[in-house]
Amino acid sequence: MDTVSLIRKKRDGHELSTEEIRFLVEGFSAGEIPDYQMSSFAMAIFFKGMTDRETADLTMAMVESGEQVDLSKINGIKVDKHSTGGVGDTTTLTLVPLVAAAGVPVAKLSGRGLGHTGGTIDKLDAIQGFSTELDIEEFIQLVNNSKVAVVGQTANLTPADKKLYALRDVTGTVDSIPLIASSIMSKKIASGADAIVLDVKTGDGAFMKEEADAIKLAEAMVAIGKQVGRKTIAVISDMSQPLGYAIGNAVEVKEAIDTLKGEGPEDLHELGLVLGSQMLILAGRAKTTEEARSLLEGVVKDGSALAKFREFIKGQHGNAEIVDQPELLPQPAEKIQVLAEKSGFVQRILAEEVGLCAMKLGAGRETKDDVIDYAVGIVLHKKVGDSVSDKETIATLYVNEKENLDEVMSRLHQAIQIGSEKVQTSALIRCIITEDGVQKI
């Protein structure tokens, strides 16, 4: 086998064998295949695509390029959840204790964020003392004892994917379904999950803006799961406006606590029930979505989900007092109200723009070396369809540094669009993708 012949083969639309794909990934990982040739191969995939079998082979080659986490010592079926990301995406913080309280082990490896706000690990870092750097033995013991632990991804997880993604980012080949799907699924499989629930976002604040593209990505990832023996289900959910009201790190932890009390935003609560129900079914804890949903609603109502969140924080050395005293979370120097400039109805909230405003305040990273300010962020007071009075507060800015304040205020006013007519909101859950196809809700 030689690299040029394989690039030509894919360029001409032919299917590569398992051995040929492994040859390319192993050679690239070892430094034997140069960047310019792998960039050419990625471009060939971009234009010609891959079959389900090829995409699964690419996924497993990237899994095998580095460390694979062995969770076999954890009792029960381990179900992981992955979100393709969005604005105010607090789901993991609510979902982890919710599912664990219902009796399903949650052993999750998560990452840090680059963009709007922090990733799950950054949000947990907003809790004083919380450690996401546990050794594997402590991690497994926590899950067996408490049903829940979340740690940062190891540096040697899917190194081939990291190396390939860096190339895709600078060669215009990011937007390729096989490459996106294999990148996401390689990390989930290497993390040791038995089954995977995917939250694939669509809308303004999502990577996949169009629902049809989100469905294609979901179908590709579910197909990979089927090919490699991991039960996988995908939920297509709306990100045309921010999820919940909070965009930031400490503010999202506070919103997660409210949601686990049964007092949080309706959309965040509902998404947790939908995703959690799928996790319970895959884990064998429930047979139907109705049974699973009832279990999850029960652990919120009786307080055990909130108690599990407290146990989760304490188990990873964090200050669990924040559950009862959220004011112990990092606080900003100032809270500044954003007032409506006219009366009417909220017609649109441009999710991506709101996320970028939060990043400008310091809640996210523009580059990987930026330091996140856990105290800052944005808390919205309105959703699409809500009525607004002139001079009414539509958002509160949590601010420490005022350098970008004027820009943020201006951009936020443009992002929260108010008109005279009430509009219908988009459905939160669009459909569910299983091995059997698309199931409309």
Image: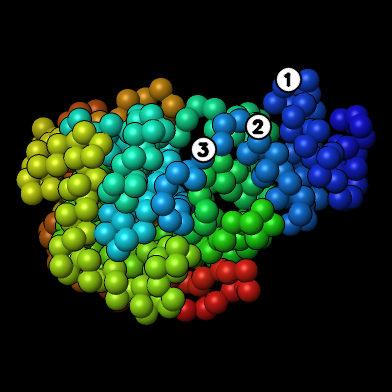
Q: Residue at x 62, y 35 (%)?
A: 161
- Report the quarter where the N terminus lies: top right
Q: Residue at x 65, y 32 (%)?
A: 65
Q: Residue at x 14, y 37 (%)?
A: 319
Position above or below: 296 against 186:
below
Element carrying mark 3: loop
3D distance between C-alphas at marks 3 and 1: 24 Å
Badge number at residue 69: 3
Q: Marks 1 and 3: in contact by CB < 8 Å?
A: no
Residue type for callout 3: Val
Q: Which of the 4 image quarters holds residue 298?
A: bottom left
3D distance between C-alphas at marks 3 and 2: 13 Å
Residue 157 seen anywhere in this rendered image of the structure: yes
Q: Position of residue 345 (x, y in %)?
A: 25, 70
* Tag in front: 2 or 1: 2
Residue 409 seen anywhere in this rendered image of the structure: no
* Tag in front: 3 or 1: 3
Q: Position of residue 322 (x, y in %)?
A: 12, 43
Position above or below: 415 against 36:
below
Question: Tag 1: Cα neighbours inside 10 Å, few (<14), some, or many (≥20)?
Answer: few
Q: Marks 1 and 2: in contact by CB < 8 Å?
A: no
Whichever of callouts 2 and 1 sits on the residue coming sooner in the sequence is 1
Judged left or right of residue 91, residue 325 is left
Residue receiving disc 1:
31
Q: Residue at x 8, y 49 (%)?
A: 324
Judged left or right of residue 89, residue 229 is right
Whichever of callouts 3 and 1 sits on the residue coming sooner in the sequence is 1
Badge number at residue 65: 2
Position above or below: 281 against 375:
below
